[in-house]
Amino acid sequence: MSQTTLIVCGIATGAGIALLVRELAPSAPRLGPALRRLDPPAARPGDQPHRTAAGTAWAGRLAERMPGRIPGSDLTLLNQTPEQFFTNKTGLALLGLLAPLVPAVGWLLMGLSVPLFIPAGGGMLLAAVLWFVPDLSVARDADRARTEFAHAAAAWMDLVATRMASNVAADQALEDAARIGHGWAFARIQEALLRARTEKSSPWQALADLGTQLRLPVLNDVADIMRLSSDDGASVYDTLRNRSKSLTSELLTAEAARANSDSEKLHTPAALLAVIVMIAMAFPAVLNIFSI
């Protein structure tokens, strides 16, 4: 056995022992996952049932022990648990770690000599890259979900303003407008308002808490507007309509900028293709010049 093989085997053995000691050694659990296990959240409208606790127990322990920041607000917005998040990360990392073994085995079967450090190093590099893929995916999906929620919130504010123009109370107008709409965004608003009514608290405070938890500034704006109506008895019809119009304008501007950016990206392949064609046409002439 070569010296390189012995070194790699020693590193793998030491890493396995270190992971085993880390898993067996007692450590302080993260407060968030521990509280969620003691008091699991109620099911939201439209949520899919999660897997059993036994199936994700190891992922829960991994989520508690792994260092780094968990995108809690993004996961809550997407109705994902930290256990599911770390399950995806671990699965992709293991896939990246084992993927280089496939071509290595093929080369060995063909009689080619493959140094062990090539598939080992490639596997560790690919595993490190794939470990961060779920983070990027969650961040992208959360941005899309917040944009979708903003579109729904603009329509919801119009509905609330219409109900309040009919001399309906502020809290009743919020609930009536939320029941009219469909989709997951309106379901989240309905849940927050229902929880506020059950707990005998103000609905605008529930909306503000939901906006802070999910990082949705539009809910904080609605909460501030409706709180003004409750405290001062002021008419907020114009304020709600103006905020809805400004939000719609912001969303349309962002969509136009995104469309322009996508259009500009299409010019790059066309320019590269033109350069390749020009090189292909000029290559014979240049070759003839140098051959004279």
Image (cartoon, grey):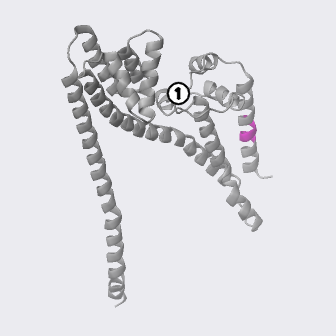
Q: Residues within 10 Å of mark 1 (few under 14, many from 20)?
A: some
**What residue is drawn where x is 62% and y is 45%?**
124
Looking at the image, residue 198 sits to the left or right of residue 106; the answer is left
Magenta stretch contains residue 44: no
Q: Given the current orientation, which residue lies at the most extreme right position?
A: 1
- Residue at x 24% of width, y 42% of height: 253
Which residue is more in the foreground, 95 or 191?
191
Relative horizontal placement of residue 257, taking residue 205 as reference (left or right): left
Task: Locate the C terminus and report the quarter of the image it occupies.
Answer: bottom left
Percent position of residue 211, x then y = 39, 23
Residue 171's place in the image compared with 17, above or below, is above
Up/down of 24 relative to 110, above or below: above
Front position in the image: 58 or 122: 58
Residue extending furthest bottom? 292
Q: Position of residue 85 (x, y in %)?
A: 57, 34
Question: Is most of the magenta stretch helix, strand or loop?
Answer: helix
Above/below status of 205 relative to 15: above
**Rendering quarter of residue 230:** top left
- In the image, the segment drawn in magenta is 10-14
7 lies left or right of 277: right
Disc tally is 1
Q: Quadrant of residue 17?
A: top right
Residue at (40% x, 21% y) in the render: 212
For the question of whether residue 95 can be seen, the reply is: yes
Query: Element type at marker 1?
Result: loop
State the residue position of label 1. Answer: 44
Give how far across and how far down residue 286 sits, in percent: 33, 83
Q: Is residue 156 left or right of residue 165?
A: right
Tag 1: amino acid: Arg
